[in-house]
Amino acid sequence: MTASIWVRPGGLPVLRTLSGMGDEGSPEVTSSSASPGVVATVLNGSLISPAHSLGSSDIGEVDLEFWDLDLNAHHSRVMAPLKITTGHGPCSDTSGSISGREDLSPPGSINGYSIDSCDASKKKKGPTPRQQEELCLVCGDRASGYHYNALTCEGCKGFFRRSITKNAVYQCKYGTNCEIDMYMRRKCQECRLKKCLSVGMRPECVVPEYQCAVKRKEKKAQKDKDKPNSTTNGSPEMVKIEPETQRVDDISLTSVNNGIKPITPEQDELIIKLVYFQNKYEQPSDEDIKKVEESTVDVEVSDARYRHITEYTILTVQLIVEFAKNLPGFDKLLREDQIVLLKACSSEVMMLRMARRYDVNTDSILFVNNHPYSRDSYNMAGMGEVIDDLLCFGRQMYDMKVDNAEYALLTSIVIFSERPSLQEAWKVEKIQEIYIEALKSYVDNRIKVRSTMIFAKLLSVLTEIRSLGNQNSEMCFSLKLRNRKLPPFLTEIWDVMT
């Protein structure tokens, strides 16, 4: 069976809509010049201990067809599916490569992924030369076609669609006269929407969500009529990892009878894979932990706490990088965009990881050495600015009963969030939509009752994570003022000015 996940126009929301107000407030993790340095080193895997280098996986492969992920945005939107096959052999230590696959990629592939397309043979030569490249009338980015009566890029098309379907009301913070370009389009949504309307984009051309839902329902009914047994004949092979991943199979087999769209086999495989790698890159090696513990012998208690927290943070960020490198779709991005995403998401994903390790009995965070770090521990280390909100966030996630699959999906959505300085933001958004749709399907089938509310709460978590990331930036600046130096690795990946 060909694995496919469909991204439907007018469908699910994306993180950019939820966290737009935080876009201009996240300088702590965003690099305007994605310089290599220490970050490039860890991306190549050299800072990860051998126990955590990516070896052969026994989980198998996940095939995803990013139907609407057009690598050449100026081409027609009607195109052959782009098939991404993620195989996991040993990582190469190839210098200057994020995944170490570029030099191993055969003809007709990109970074080790096969492209099954009618014009795959032309990919290596680049797009067909054009007499004049068409630009988006809204922001000046490369246009992908006429959308809603105007020539626009994919990003502005999606922004306009979401703004209209949600009846969004924006407010400009800069005087309502912003000049919209590829940078300002992320900063001012009100002026961007005004520009969309001024260049001729028509709200009446946007198909209402309820009509999209009706069409999807009709298409599904026709598909079920053509293949009456397709939803019950067998199931994908399951890998027993965590209760959440095994439950995905049970959900898929029972949800049809409850009138809920079942999780697709492709989403099954995706979720299983995410939980697998979440577990694989959850814990540093015993050797790494031992090195940290030994480095604080004969050190004052306050300094020892501080060094513990910062050194374990480095190990955690390195594991986050390894997890991200294994996400389906990540290697489809430009190397520069990969670096931007990793630098931007590291502190936010770290907040999610700490919430997973929240101990409600002691109101503390269990670090990777399995020692509880309470409010007092952070205050003693001089890092008490963030601990109250972090513990509150941990309690919130505990009360919501977020399971491992939901954590893995949320982490992936955070990684594929729109960030300033992305060269192909539209591609990141397309990939993110697939993960959001998988989370929606998983929640609908796991919870059933009030699933829409739970799904909305899970997505609202993303804005809280962005806020915690901002607090992390403020704390780093505060540490600098108190002459508390961060390790060079954290200084670079969080863009802390020295």
Image: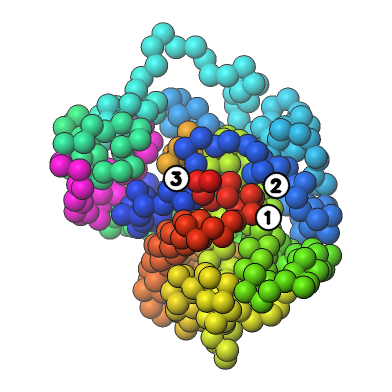
Dot 1 crowding, Cα within 10 Å, few <14, some 14–19, many 20+: many
Which three-letter amino acid code belongs to the residue tagged 3? Arg
Q: Which mark is residue 42?
A: 2
The answer to whether residue 397 of the structure is visible from this angle is: no
Q: Which residues are magenta?
A: 153-176
Q: Secondary structure at mark 3?
A: loop
Helix, strand, or loop for circle 2?
helix
Q: Is residue 12 above or below residue 341?
A: below
Seen as rendered, the residue at the extreme top is 131
Q: Nearer the viewer, residue 238 or 232?
A: 238
Query: Mark 1 or mark 2, which is nearer the start of the sequence?
Result: 2
Residue 400 or residue 376, whichever sits in front: 376
Residue under the point 80% across and 64% down: 291
Find residue 474 and report its horizontal and vertical position in percent.
43, 59
Answer few, some or many: residues within 10 Å of disc 3's Cα (few below 14, many 20 plus, some between 14 and 19).
many
Check if mark 2's residue and mark 3's residue have beta carbons within 8 Å.
no
- Mark 1 highlights which residue? 318
Check disc 1 and report its element: helix, strand or loop. helix
Cβ atoms at labels 1 and 3 below 8 Å apart: no
> How far apart in space, not on screen, are marks 1 and 3 (Cα)?
20 Å
Give the residue at x 50% y 61%. 482
Look at the picture and state if 112 lies above or below 164: above
The x and y percentages for residue 484 are 56, 60
Give the side of residue 18 with respect to residue 104, left or right. Answer: left
What separation in Å lies between label 2 and label 1 (alpha carbons)?
7 Å
Queried whether the magenta region covers residue 250, the answer comes back as no
Residues tagged 2 and 1 counted as in contact (Cβ below 8 A): yes
Residue 23: give x, y in percent of width and height.
Answer: 36, 50
Give the x, y percent position of residue 351. 53, 66
Which quarter of the figure has residue 385? bottom left
Residue on which the image places disc 3: 419
Residue at the image position 38 percent from the left and 78 percent from the top: 450
